[in-house]
Image (tube, rainbow, N blue to C red):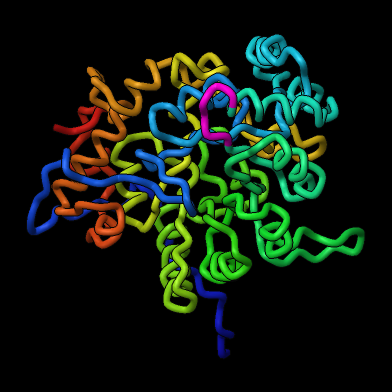
Amino acid sequence: MKIPQLKELQRAYGFEEVAIVPGDMTVNPEQTNIEFKLDKLTFPIPVLAAAMDGAVNPAFAVRFSKIGGLAVLNLEGVYSRYERPEEVLEKIIAAPQEKVTQVLQQVYAEPIKEKLVGERIQAIRKAGGVCAVSVTPQNTKNLHKVAMEAGVDVFVVQSTVTTARHSSKSYRGLIFSELCQWMRGTPIIVGNVVSYPAALELMRTGISALLVGVGPGAACTTREVLGVGVPQVTATMECAAARDAYLKESGRYVPLITDGGMRTGGDLCKAFASGADAVMLGSSIAQAEEAPGKGYHWGMANPHPSLPRGTRVRVGVRGKIQEILFGPTSVTDGTQNLIGALRTCMGVCGAATIKEMHGARMVIAPAIKTEGKFYQAGQVCK
């Protein structure tokens, strides 16, 4: 009996399954250029703080901006629903684990108030911060005008999976080329994507940057609930191929932001070696003393009224944001001085810029814990 051809499965790789090969020359880490350019904006460090209520509030956004990164405020979170969001955060943090999803659903059932949207954006701008906000596609048409009038600097449209085309019998989907016209030059970041065709099609709409990653985040359960997702190394490489193809096609460079799944400096470095121009961090940011979640972290899809795709996780408070990003650190697990790790890795690979880091060679490698590191039990090797 002839067996019919079966569906082919592509092997995909996550951060734990690859390693970066040192270069044939080295560069002084202090001389590496890690700037992230987003249209006319330039950020000294290529790090975005994720649009999650336990990670970013207006005060944190200002602080993060002043140390060189870009923090994204969730425009559909507690800060745009409640005059006194601190009280609501305390309720979420104090909820027993078995009831937290129910509490989140109740909290986020409160309507978004346009007045608060404008006030939060203006508060960040008046304090001297670069203001980035995130909305879901279904709320973009309602909230983009308020954000524009309030003076937003960067507009992020984000959902579990985002494509340039959407089929629906009930409403006309968001057209990103139209949004680019509406926003009149304000940089637009769109996500999340993991595939070459979707990335290429979104770039052709005129958007400014792409978020890469479906399901890898510490608080995300999309892969468990929906079975959807691609490990981050493969996802970033595939979208990077689309970016490079679009650059040849149009002459326009659309940066990639790998979003989720990074816990250590090594993960960060592998994201850049895979083709990322910047990274978006959630759990690492939520571990900062200044973060509003006080060591707790939950995602934007958690409060979905009928199909939540996330969970509140306890990440703990590990230090000030300055220590997490720049050190000094006394921990050996790679969770602090992330920027120092990136610069050092670039130096070892002989990469003076992020674009040169894209050319770093990678190999498939055994997970660190299986490669003779049995006794480290979670510690990083020397």
Seen in the picture, residue 56 relative to 243 is either above or below; the reply is above
What are the residue bounds of the magenta stretch? Answer: 126-131
Q: From the image, which quarter does the N terminus lie in?
A: bottom right
Seen in the picture, residue 30 relative to 241 is either above or below; the reply is above
Residue at 56% from the left image edge and 33% from the top image edge: 219
Where is residue 379 drawn, in percent x and y? Answer: 25, 27
Residue at 56% from the left image edge and 26% from the top image edge: 56
Q: From the image, which quarter does the C terminus lie in?
A: top left
Q: Which one is nearer the viewer's eye here, 167 or 112?
A: 112
Q: Which one is nearer the viewer's eye here, 75 or 53?
A: 75
Residue at 16% from the left image edge and 43% from the top image edge: 31
Residue 117 covered by magenta stretch: no
Where is residue 346 drawn, in percent x and y? Answer: 21, 47
The answer to whether residue 298 is seen in the rendering is yes
Seen in the picture, residue 196 relative to 103 is either above or below; the reply is below
User: Which residue, as the protein is rendered here, is positioned at the far right?
Assistant: 170
Where is residue 166 drawn, in percent x and y? Answer: 76, 64
User: Which residue, as the protein is rendered here, is positioned at the far bottom?
Assistant: 2
Residue at 32% from the left image edge and 21% from the top image edge: 323
User: Which residue, as the protein is rendered here, is positioned at the far left?
Assistant: 25
Where is residue 289 drawn, in percent x and y? Answer: 45, 14
Magenta stretch, overall SS: loop
